[in-house]
Image: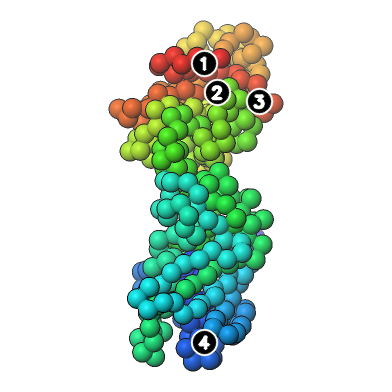
Amino acid sequence: MNGARTRTLRTGWTTGACAAAAAKAAYYALVTGEFPDPIEITLPKGQRPAFALACEQHGEGYARAGIIKDAGDDPDVTHGATVLSTVRRGPPGSGVRFFAGPGVGTVTRPGLPIPPGEPAINPVPRRMIVAAIAEVAELFGAPTDVEVEVSIPGGERLAEKTMNPRLGIIGGLSVLGTTGIVRPFSCASWIASIHRGIDVARATGLTHVVGATGSTSEAVARARHSLPEEACLDMGDFVGGTLKYLRAHPVPRLTLAGGVGKFTKLAQGALDLHSGRSRVDFHALALLLEEAGGPADLVASTSAANTAKEVFDQAANAGIDLGGLVARRARMIARSVLRDAPVDLEVIVIDRSGEILGVAGFDKSCGER
């Protein structure tokens, strides 16, 4: 043993949890004139975390509190950002009303959990904020008619690294979270973004979407079909999550586009294409080439190959259409996940330069090039 220890990854707090805690602290100050620090809130599953305040401001008719988001060990673009909640009294009977401050986006397209025109503060964070306001109101006999403005300085720039622009959320980030807790390296938020992309596509009447494993494959598929950006899903490695959601929420036409390594794994039945969770089976790839009539030396070298690209290059030199073979097998696997969903499916295999190496086309021709 080398004495190294495996470190447990830290969990963190969602933007929604930070906004709720900041809103509670701000309303507490609006009612009493004092900011509680730290401030406790109740998360959806009953946990009671405490948050230290990074900002306190009390002015005429408002109070503002800020919390620096700690996402734990998750590679979250909002880690270290300051989440501010400004609270003002609202008209009697209005309840809690939400507003987007600087750095928080506004929804502009249908299909998301929040309707167009509303600040991009998701339903669970809204409920957390309402509950936090209610705790203060009950403690001091204060009204629950308040206006809560959430802002994230620098959020508009950070949003460029997210799917928000593609989803039609303009002006900044979304305030997210379903449990209040960020699990490090969780796939849930990415898959949720894919689902929202499909929802938006359906709500806006798009009939053809692209699930791509990366920017190069996305560009190839977009150009092939002259599709708008909003038709493209940042699928990444989560082909299984994409297909399963489309099975329940179908779009008439789907193009899957990806590189040789990832789509070879898909052709072999993998639905999570991350290198840490699936590997190319070179023995199975060798059998595929043997079934296709590949020469014996190619079949033998494939079993001992290091990368899928190496095999594709050797197959091309031998005149074997490995791209087409993999595309057809990948399409068969994807079709089995979609089951009988009314989704016409195309699979495109490309190389790193963007050259198409294989296509398994739609069942119904629609002018493919």
Element assignment for label 4: helix
The residue tagged 1 is 368
Q: Which dot marks residue 354?
A: 3
Q: CA distance from mark 3 to mark 4?
A: 57 Å
Q: Tag 1: residue type?
A: Glu
Q: Tag 2: residue type?
A: His
Q: Is residue 168 above or below residue 40?
A: above
Front residue of 360/220: it is 220
The residue tagged 2 is 225
Q: Is residue 105 above or below residue 274?
A: below
The answer to whether residue 297 is left or right of residue 197 is: right
Report if the CB atoms under discs 1 and 2 are less than 8 Å apart: yes
Q: Which dot marks residue 325?
A: none
Q: Earlier in the sequence, mark 1 or mark 2?
A: 2
Q: Earlier in the sequence, mark 1 or mark 3?
A: 3
Q: CA distance from mark 1 to mark 3?
A: 18 Å
Residue under the point 36% across and 34% down: 250
